[in-house]
């Protein structure tokens, strides 16, 4: 039987996905397994894969098949059917990809691969001067990319890049969410500071062996529902969730000698991403429909499992007894309450990935502000450290002692990811909304969590979000699941309630 | 400055090498890291990479550049110069690759990826029936490949496949080496059997933790000269040495609870491959000149480090005291002599990779005989187990109790590697010749080994073999290094001397 144009298009798209999965594996390997001397060759491999994928996706054949399929009413009549969704997503990505010359794609890939390596070394040595020229190169390349993509008259160049992470995201749109959020967060943090009370950090005070920590966080990830026959958990400097497809999901985490609470938070975060990736529709692997929605929704799931489950009092009724199983008497005296307050300390700090769920959002707002100015040429890479430090003094009231823990702390800019950070806070907002909806539907989730039962929540999320793949765009999905659009109220309600309990506000 | 045709050819060849390095990483990952559910997607990735590489290498542009360069006397005047060697090697591989249709390449890659997985499961379950149809498919594909390649009138189809592993290797040539070797090996093994004396196997009797074993074998590999900043050592069911290029070499080994001697032998074997791969000329990465010579020479280096160093009495003067450092008092009473005899027991057994260096060669001869008949259609996959078992009874005097430890024990056939096995025994022969030459040049190597000094041997080998890349073909290299061609005398002398000492023959 001859292939229909739609079948031919999907076959080609699945081949391109194999290249994407390969690039993703190269990247996972670079962060977790590759010996340090491999970096130069690896950047060549990544650049080549990236170019091959781009060339293949932007070939005229894809454009022709796409147009033929779009003209077929049987495929597009139901806008939410898998074929219609595949065509919608491919069209947007195809038009966008055509705007970028193959040489720029390869140059960008090569530059980010090298910059990521330089960044890791420069951060270790607190040597911003070493990283600076690479950051400059990346910003120039990002501006070239933005100009290729273009942006609407009432928008700005940041929008052109953000669109790649979250369709429809604009700097103005982000402002509209951030502006009302910021003063209430700042006020909340001030009230806590004025209270002068700080709970014990019982989970991050005790030295325990790394291999025991790994067994513990694996056990929790497995109980939440991560399927280790279809995925892995390894260690990397900056935790992430990658892999090739739903049946080969690679999460990473990181450990300190005396940072069990942080290691668990980081693992539960990636487990949220991991469970989502493992639960997209199996029959659409390699197609757009078989992928997760944009970054904000993805982040909502990592935040939901990390913060709304992992920092919840009832979760620790189940989890605290596990400490004895894994660490002998190292955590004697740390019961559910002690563990819970340790997981919910609010304290302005230097490092985003170590921040509590309240101050976290201010870290994001600072990055959004600075990357917008870097791209617009209003801030030079020479002045970045000073601008960074001033923003931390202003919003979080803390002094930044060095660039390693200041403007060089994140991997994102070193891999050319600007336009990305705000999706983290959008994720927090969506997470709060989804969790409210889940509670309404499931009833007493606390009773379930206290028994270590996470299946009902996972199934509810799988049905409504994970198994839907890319059927809906972010805002539409939010409406489908919660009955309303994006709002900051659920997050603020959640934080105020939790901190009211914890800090007696 | 415009690129010369030679520069253009090398640039293209290096890009193709990046694809090859990526395929190699996919394969390493599949054996060491990939979750089991990833196999189907991975076989798609491997097939695609293999097809892309083949398409790119067989493009008319490569042929044109190659012809242009070959006509340039400045490039070819010195037949041993890097450009002339690159052109010689590319021409042979190009002509060979052109004979294979892209579809067959992809089909073969897909079939081997699946068969390798089925083999691993079938071997666990001792279920030859499950593996059989896949082996049949592979033999059909191998015969199609052999017919595409063709073979000389006085040759046979096996030769067409062997050429891909070792240029110039033929079944007749193998026979000419194996035929005189076999009776002397059989006689030697019989004399040992008749002696009725068997030394203690002190290294493979004690249960020691796997993580301590890993630290021990790593320490030895590092001391021999493997550079862990440019490579890794992991665990896989079947040990191998892969990776992407000289600065990212991936070795694997395997452990049992009470098989320290085997784990060390296996690690030293792969370390020989690894040191070779790390020492090819850096300025020719990605070019044929920058690669190791064919499989026999590669194997000679794994055998040299495993057998001629690792099973030598003087090596154990240095190594035996390490046992206490790594395993506490688990090996109390195991001194250099006890360790040495444990590493040199001769005992006909079922499993090739566990075989001593004497009986090993008979395992190879059996495989050579059977794969030659399988390819020629003289033996069907239905009759393979019976033929296997009969050969083991005849040559090694042992009964094969099941197929898992019989005809399914090796990974090779499951990945379609027929024409490969004899290179192992050729490696043993070359190793003996090279080691004799090294001893003549370096003087008292035993005094060095007893002090844990392996640098002089490694440097001697690096200068004469590793750093030469592919300058010489195997036989020519042997003449350069030893002053003579391939011979079985040095190996037989070595075995008779060692076993004379060990068994008092």
Image (cartoon, coloured by chain):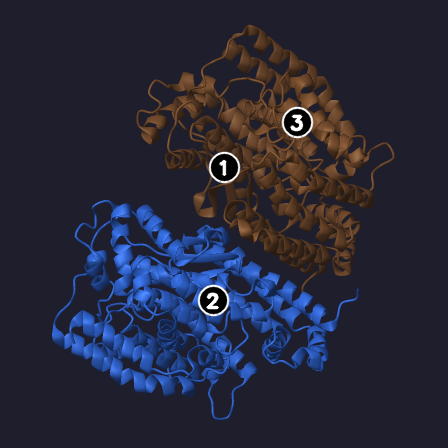
Chain colours: A brown, B blue
Relative to A41, B163 lies left or right:
left
Q: Are marks 3 and 2 in contact (CB under 8 Å)?
A: no
Chain letter of disc 3 in the image: A
3 or 2: mark nearer the eye: 2
Pick whichever, B299 or A286, lies toward us.
B299
Which residue is disc 2 drawn over?
A: B462
Q: Secondary structure at mark 2?
A: helix
The subunit carrying tag 2 is: B
* Secondary structure under the numbered disc 3 in the rendered image: helix
**Do badges 3 and 2 share one subunit?**
no
Residue drawn at the location 72% of the way across and 57% of the way down: A55
Residue B183 in percent (x, y) is at 26, 85
Q: Is any atom of residue A8 visible in this view?
A: yes
Q: Label 1 belongs to which residue?
A: A253
Q: CA distance from mark 3 to mark 1?
A: 21 Å
Q: Is residue A181 left or right of residue B384?
A: right
Residue at image x 40%, y 63%?
B456
Quadrant assignment, res A163: top right
Task: Return the residue nearer the eye: B380 or B272.
Answer: B272
Where residue B367 sits in the image (x, y, percent)?
35, 76
Label 3: how many Cα within 10 Å (few below 14, some 14–19, many 20+)? some
| Residue sitting farthest toward the right | A153
The mark closer to the camera, 2 or 1, is: 2
Farthest residue, direction bottom: B154
Left or right of A328 in this view: A273: right
Q: Which image quadrant: the N terminus of chain B?
A: bottom right
Circle on res. A364: 3
In the foreground, B89 or A204: B89
Q: CA distance from mark 2 to mark 1?
A: 40 Å
Give how far across and how far down residue A338 sits, in percent: 41, 17
> Which residue extends farthest front?
B443
In the figure, residue B340 lies in which quadrant? Answer: bottom left
């Amino acid at each position: 039987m001859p292939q229909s144009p739609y079948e031919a298009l999907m076959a080609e798209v699945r081949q391109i996905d194999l290249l994407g999965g390969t690039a993703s594996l190269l990247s996972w390997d670079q962060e977790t397994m590759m010996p340090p001397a491999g970096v130069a060759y690896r950047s060549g491999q990544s650049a080549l894969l990236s170019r091959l994928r781009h060339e293949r996706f932007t070939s005229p054949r894809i454009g022709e098949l796409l147009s033929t399929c779009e003209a077929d009413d049987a495929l597009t009549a139901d806008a939410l059917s898998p074929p219609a969704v595949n065509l919608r997503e491919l069209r947007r990505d195809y038009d966008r990809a055509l705007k970028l010359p193959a040489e720029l794609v390869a140059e960008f890939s090569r530059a980010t691969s090298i910059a990521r390596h330089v960044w890791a070394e420069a951060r270790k040595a607190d040597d911003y001067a070493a990283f600076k020229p690479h950051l400059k190169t990346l910003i120039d390349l990002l501006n070239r990319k933005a100009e290729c993509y273009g942006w609407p008259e009432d928008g700005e160049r940041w929008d052109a890049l953000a669109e790649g992470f979250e369709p429809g995201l604009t700097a103005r749109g982000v402002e509209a969410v951030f502006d009302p959020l910021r003063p209430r967060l700042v006020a909340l943090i001030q009230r806590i500071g004025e209270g002068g009370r700080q709970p014990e950090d019982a989970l991050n005070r005790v030295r325990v062996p790394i291999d025991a920590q790994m067994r513990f966080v694996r056990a929790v990830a497995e109980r939440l529902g991560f399927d280790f026959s279809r995925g892995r958990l390894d260690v990397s400097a900056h935790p992430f969730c990658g892999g090739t497809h739903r049946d080969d999901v690679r999460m990473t985490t990181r450990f300190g000698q005396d940072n069990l609470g942080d290691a668990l938070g980081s693992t539960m975060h990636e487990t949220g991403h991991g469970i989502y990736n493992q639960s997209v529709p199996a029959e659409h692997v390699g197609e757009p429909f078989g992928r997760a929605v944009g970054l904000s929704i993805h982040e909502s799931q990592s935040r939901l499992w990390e913060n709304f489950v992992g920092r919840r009092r009832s979760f620790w009724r189940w989890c605290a007894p596990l400490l004895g199983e894994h660490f002998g008497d190292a955590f004697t005296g740390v019961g559910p309450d002690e563990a819970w307050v340790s997981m919910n300390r609010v304290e302005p700090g230097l490092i985003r990935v170590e921040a509590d769920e309240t101050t976290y959002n201010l870290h994001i707002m600072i990055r959004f502000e600075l990357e917008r100015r870097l791209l617009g040429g209003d801030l030079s890479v020479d002045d970045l450290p000073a601008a960074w430090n001033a923003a931390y003094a202003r919003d979080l009231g803390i002094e930044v002692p060095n660039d390693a823990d200041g403007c060089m702390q994140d991997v994102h800019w070193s891999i050319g990811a600007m336009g990305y950070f705000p999706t983290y806070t959008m994720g927090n907002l969506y997470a709060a909304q989804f969790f409210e909806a889940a509670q309404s539907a499931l009833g007493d989730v606390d009773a379930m969590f206290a028994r270590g039962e996470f299946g009902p929540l996972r199934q509810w999320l799988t049905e409504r979000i994970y198994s839907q793949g890319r059927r809906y765009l972010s805002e539409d999905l939010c409406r489908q699941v919660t009955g309303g659009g994006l709002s900051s109220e659920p997050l603020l309600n959640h934080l105020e309630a939790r901190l009211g309990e914890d800090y007696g506000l």
